[in-house]
Amino acid sequence: MERSVVVAIAEGLHARPAALFVAEAGKQPVPVTVRKGDAAPVQAASILGIMTLGAAAGETLVLATEADGPEAEASLDALETFLSQVEIA
């Protein structure tokens, strides 16, 4: 299961937004990976992996999980919602 998401966060996934994204990913019941373009996917719960993406505002990321069912869908929904925020509180 995978989903494409455009990063709406003004700062992109750098520093604080990346740390908050990783924390949100760690709360999910199934593991999720993130990739940008044709690059290899990284674990969504890995700060080092997320920082290496260098994802800026307006770029498309692909969220994916090998899991299936409602927990997998809920995990992708939560991370998509996070990336779709314009501002991080």
Image (cartoon, rainbow, N blue to C red):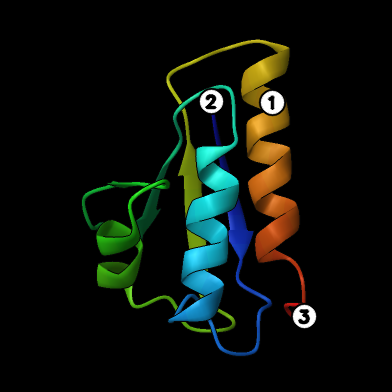
Circle 2/circle 1 CB separation < 8 Å: yes
Disc 1 marks which residue? Answer: 73
Estimate the x, y position of residue 7 in percent, counting from the top left: 60, 71
**Real-space Cα separation, disc 2 to disc 1, in angstroms:** 8 Å
Label 1 residue SS = helix
Q: Which disc number belongs to residue 1?
A: 2
Neighbor class of circle 1 (other Cα within 10 Å; few <14, some 14-19, many 20+) is some
- The residue sitting at 73% across, 40% down in the picture is 77
Residue tagged 3: 86
- Note whether 29 is above or below 57 in the view shown: above
Quadrant in the rendering for residue 89? bottom right
Who comes first in sequence, dot 1 or dot 3? 1
Who is closer to the viewer here, 88 or 79? 88
**Vertically, is 82 above or below 7?**
above
Left or right of 70 in this view: 52: left
Left or right of 55, for residue 2? right
Q: Label 3's element? A: loop
